[in-house]
């Protein structure tokens, strides 16, 4: 099981996906997704990525754009190019200068 969580699935920058994604392993999105995303481990949203839908993962590292609500039992990273329009619920959040967040924030358990 830990081997599966250490693997990474990638949605490349030239890929558009309409539909929901569920994964127990790490997931990197560099393309466009319209739908719900549920990841049992770490979710990485690349600089050129656009996600329209709610996302849930233990750890979420955002460089790109999210239009939807975010839930993370552990931590959300909003990197300098991140743009989030939606609510964030997480145990912790780290924001870099230059990131944009428009929504409600709930931090804690």
Image (cartoon, rainbow, N blue to C red):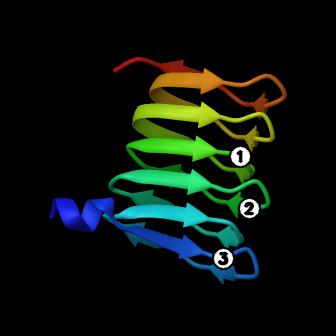
Q: On screen, 87 above or below 44?
A: above
Image location of residue 68, percent across then percent down: 66, 49
Q: Is residue 50 left or right of residue 72?
A: right
Tell which tag, 3 or 2, sits nearer the viewer.
3
Q: Residue at x 59, y 34 (%)?
A: 77
Classify residue 1 as left or right of residue 95: left
SS of the residue under disc 2:
loop
* Residue placed under numbered mark 2 in the picture: 49
| Position of residue 75 measured from the top left corner of the image (x, y, whole percent) | 46, 31
Q: Earlier in the sequence, mark 3 or mark 2?
A: 3
Instruction: Return the residue nearer the eye: 59 or 86.
Output: 59
The disc at residue 63 is 1
Where is residue 26 shown, x and y percent of the image?
41, 60
55 left or right of 38 in image? right
Q: Which mark is residue 12?
A: 3
* 104 w.r.t. 41: above or below: above
Question: Taking the image as drawn, is residue 36 in sight?
Answer: no
> Can residue 109 be seen?
yes
User: Please, what secondary structure does the residue beneath circle 1 have?
Assistant: loop
Q: Does 47 appear above or below 36?
A: above
Task: Give neighbour class at mark 2: few <14, some 14-19, many 20+ (Cα, 10 Å).
Answer: many
Alpha carbons under labels 3 and 2: distance apart: 9 Å
Residue 86 place in picture, x, y as percent: 69, 40
Occupied quadrant, residue 95: top right
Secondary structure of the residue carrying tag 3 is loop
Sequence-first tag of 1 and 3: 3
């Amino acid at each position: 099981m830990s081997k599966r969580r250490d693997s990474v699935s990638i949605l490349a920058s030239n890929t558009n996906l309409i539909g929901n994604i569920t994964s127990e392993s790490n997931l990197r999105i560099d393309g466009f997704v319209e739908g719900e995303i549920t990841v049992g481990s770490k979710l990485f949203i690349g600089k050129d990525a656009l996600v329209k839908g709610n996302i849930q993962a233990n750890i979420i590292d955002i460089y790109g754009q999210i239009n939807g609500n975010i839930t993370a039992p552990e931590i959300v990273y909003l990197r300098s190019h991140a743009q989030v329009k939606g609510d964030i619920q997480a145990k912790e959040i780290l924001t870099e200068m230059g990131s944009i967040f428009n929504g409600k924030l709930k931090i804690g358990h």
